[in-house]
């Protein structure tokens, strides 16, 4: 394990050194390469003939959106619908441990694969496109509840900000980042990129998505929310800092924040799921 980590460290530093070199001689190429590394997942895809077991006995539907397509999986239940939104380098099978808890409620559960993940199309992942996928699924299925993990949680927050008047009445956000600027800063630090790269990446986001890094903030988006939110983050999360969850909760007026310890980034825990179920269904039975 230590050897693998060492190899990864050397590889990241080598890539970072190459990008730093390019930033002087071919800055446009440096920007495109660094953005590609940031936005293209390396794992999380699978083919239809190799579906994870948890996804095999589901109803499936493929949605087409502009030049993209994305996949959904449905576990049929009653008229209450829950939409599940996974995170980076994952897919809908990540909800395997969550499903039994949610199915006790009798609800119909729908999961979707993110851009460039699972059976969905593309090589690039980005939150604005994921929010568009979410919106297509919300329009079709009319879920009352949405649950997002990691960057999937950030996509749920952005979707709610863009489309506040949908069927969604409650949100659960697990281990999610708040600020894009923090993600970019961490990425630059991980690759040891030089100080020429941040302005280049900032320009990429302005040109590609028409927003500045500091404007893309879950903390800011959540200040507009009126629906109830349940936000949980683990103090030992080494993928998304605990402070990000606190930021997200700080401006969300109608929300509760749950601090966990020892769950890491995955956030799978029976006690936590009991709290989620209580939040979602207390007073409805």
Image (cartoon, grey):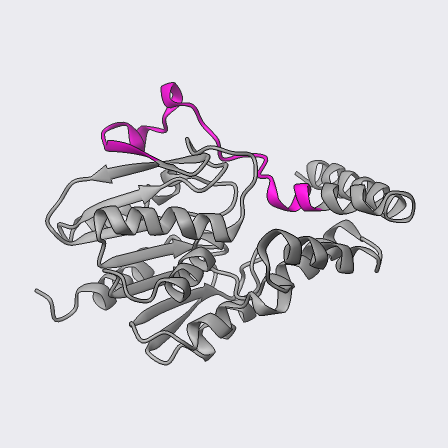
What residue appears at the point 43 percent right and 57 percent down from the top-left corner? 153
Segment tinted magenta in the rendering: 35-63
What residue appears at the point 58 percent right and 69 percent down from the top-left corner? 215
Is residue 61 a member of the stretch shown in magenta? Answer: yes
In percent of width and height, residue 138 lies at 28, 51
Horizontal side, residue 18 vs residue 110: left or right: right
Of 221 and 177, the residue lying toward us: 221
What residue appears at the point 54 percent right and 43 percent down from the top-left corner? 125
In percent of width and height, residue 177 lies at 52, 62
In percent of width and height, residue 210 lies at 59, 59
Horizontal side, residue 229 vs residue 86: left or right: left
Horizontal side, residue 63 vs residue 12: left or right: left
What residue appears at the point 55 percent right and 71 percent down from the top-left corner? 243
In percent of width and height, residue 238 lies at 58, 57
Is residue 273 a member of the stretch shown in magenta? Answer: no
Quadrant that contains the N terminus:
top right
Quadrant that contains the C terminus:
bottom left
């Amino acid at each position: 394990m230590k050897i693998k980590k060492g190899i990864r460290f050397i590889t990241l530093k080598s890539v970072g050194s190459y990008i730093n070199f390019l930033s002087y001689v071919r800055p446009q190429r440096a920007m495109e390469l660094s953005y590609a590394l940031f936005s293209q997942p390396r794992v999380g895809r699978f083919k239809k003939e190799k579906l994870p077991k948890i996804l095999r006995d589901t109803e499936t539907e493929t949605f087409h959106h502009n030049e993209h397509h994305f996949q959904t999986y449905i576990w049929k239940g009653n008229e209450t619908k829950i939409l599940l939104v996974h995170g980076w380098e994952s897919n809908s099978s990540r909800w395997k441990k969550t499903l039994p808890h949610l199915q006790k409620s009798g609800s119909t559960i729908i999961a979707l694969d993110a851009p460039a993940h699972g059976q969905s199309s593309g090589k690039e992942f980005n939150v604005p496109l994921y929010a568009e996928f979410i919106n297509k699924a919300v329009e079709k299925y009319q879920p009352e509840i949405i649950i997002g993990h990691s960057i999937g949680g950030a996509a749920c927050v952005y979707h709610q900000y863009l489309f506040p008047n949908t069927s969604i009445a409650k949100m659960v956000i697990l281990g999610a980042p708040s600020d894009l600027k923090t993600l970019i800063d961490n990425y630059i630090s991980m690759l040891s990129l030089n100080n020429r790269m941040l302005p280049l990446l900032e320009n990429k986001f302005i040109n590609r998505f028409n927003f500045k890094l500091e404007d893309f903030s879950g903390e800011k988006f959540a200040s507009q929310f009126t629906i109830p939110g349940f936000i949980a983050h683990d103090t030992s999360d080494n993928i998304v800092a605990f402070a990000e969850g606190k930021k997200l909760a700080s401006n969300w007026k109608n929300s509760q924040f749950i601090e966990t310890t020892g769950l890491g980034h995955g956030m799978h825990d029976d006690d936590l799921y009991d709290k989620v179920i209580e939040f979602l269904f207390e007073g409805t039975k």
